[in-house]
Image (cartoon, rainbow, N blue to C red):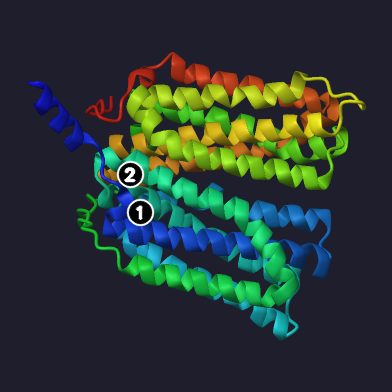
Amino acid sequence: MDEGAESAAGVAARPREVLRQPAFGYLWTASSIRALGGAVSGVALNVLVVSVLHATPVQISILSALGVLPYLFLGLIVGALMDRWRRQRTLVVTSIGRAIALAAIPVLMFTDTLHFWSVAIVALVLGVLILFADSATQPLVPRIVPRESLVMANARLGQSQTVADTAGPALGGALLNVLGAPLLFVFDAIFTAASAVLQARIRVDEPKPGRREPGRHVGHDIAEGMRYTYRHPTLRPLALSVHTWFLGNSIVMTMFAVFVLRQLKLQPWGYGLALAFGGVGGFLGALIAPRVGARLGAGRAIFLGRALVVAPWLALAVVPVSAASRGVALLALVAAAQFVYCLAMGIEDANDTGYRQSVAPDAIQGRMNSTIRTVNRTVFFFGALLAGLVATFLGYRLTMGIGAAIFVVAALIVAFSPLLRARHDEAPPPAE
């Protein structure tokens, strides 16, 4: 092949900007406005629970658990359903349901029927609907985006989520003072309803699944998805690595705020600023993720993210912080740690999800993703409980060190497996 032909081939192989593809454009816009509305109303919900309902610590923990419980009890079932239901239609229906649930909060407030358990019911309903939406989104993306553009698509979704998570709380705090909590929930309901309209405009060909064989039920579908995931030569180490990563993440993130605010004595405004640096790091990581994946390959890009995440937590565990060094030096350390931590996540998440979507056939996408996601949530749930015990008996610094050590194990699983050599542009290996 001559030089001109090679150049032409390179141009042809380069993925087209996914936001120019109408179906993904609608999906991305819907996800972005919903994420921003959720981040804004999340501030109102926190204020409502803490300052209006005067919830106890136990009640706050119950609300937090309600966000995870649907994944623990329904995650595998919903994943199996997503391989038999129309995913685009599921997104539309769940968005309409979420809009109704959000609109119920100001109605409860105006009718003086708002109390902790009514909020808990709304939170549980939202958690179930979000589970269905998440379970539909991941397997839908490969139906509307070419295989070579999957990493870019997930990077674009990650960027908008990062912007919403970073700017949304600040915007929500400002609007809360001006408009009050009820209107913030109304706006979020309107944003969510608008996302349903955009999702309804997505044009996608979703083939109807075949009928189940006699004697076969949803339990057989779930078992098939788990076998496929954990017998696949590259998905198995990817799943085991991300499960391990979630264990480390549950430990460090559960204790991070109390560690830096209580033991390191960072000022609250400094803590908020550090989180903002994390948002910048996450956006940058998602921005460069497609290039990193194309240059290094899927496996090495995932390994880079897994390995890079060790550094910030190890630094927080071992770097001495004396009373004299608190101030700018402490703020710089915590901000840098958050920046690197979120940068690593931005790099690995798009490559991890994109590779998963490119490997599994469409008929098992929902079950493969739900298997990994459900185990991740289960690990996080119990890891968060473990973190409190470890910090109580061993202290915060050693807890951070244990989290960093677990992140090392997650990286080593990738390093010593066939996943390390996997590339996005190669035909995926068959399941065993």
**Outermost residue toward the top?**
416
Q: Quadrant of residue 25?
A: bottom left
Looking at the image, residue 258 lies above or below residue 410? below
Are discs 1 and 2 less than 8 Å apart at CB? yes
Residue that numbered label 1 is attached to = 82
Element at label 1: helix
Residue 230, visible in the rendered structure: no
Residue 12, visible in the rendered structure: yes
Q: Is residue 410 left or right of residue 94?
A: right
Mark 1 vs 2, N-terminal side: 1
**Outermost residue toward the bottom?**
111
Looking at the image, residue 71 lies above or below residue 351? below
Q: Label 2 crowding class (10 Å Cα cut-off): few <14, some 14-19, many 20+?
A: many
The circle on residue 365 is 2
Which residue is at a point 10% across and 27% down the rendered structure image?
4
Looking at the image, residue 79 lies above or below residue 308? below
Q: Amino acid at mark 1?
A: Met
Q: Amino acid at mark 2?
A: Gln
The quarter of the rendered structure image containing the N terminus is top left
The span from disc 1 to disc 2 (Cα, nearest Å) is 8 Å
Which residue is at a point 66% across and 64% down the rendered structure image?
172
Q: Position of residue 304 (x, y in %)?
A: 48, 23
Which residue is at a point 75% across and 22% down the rendered structure image?
317
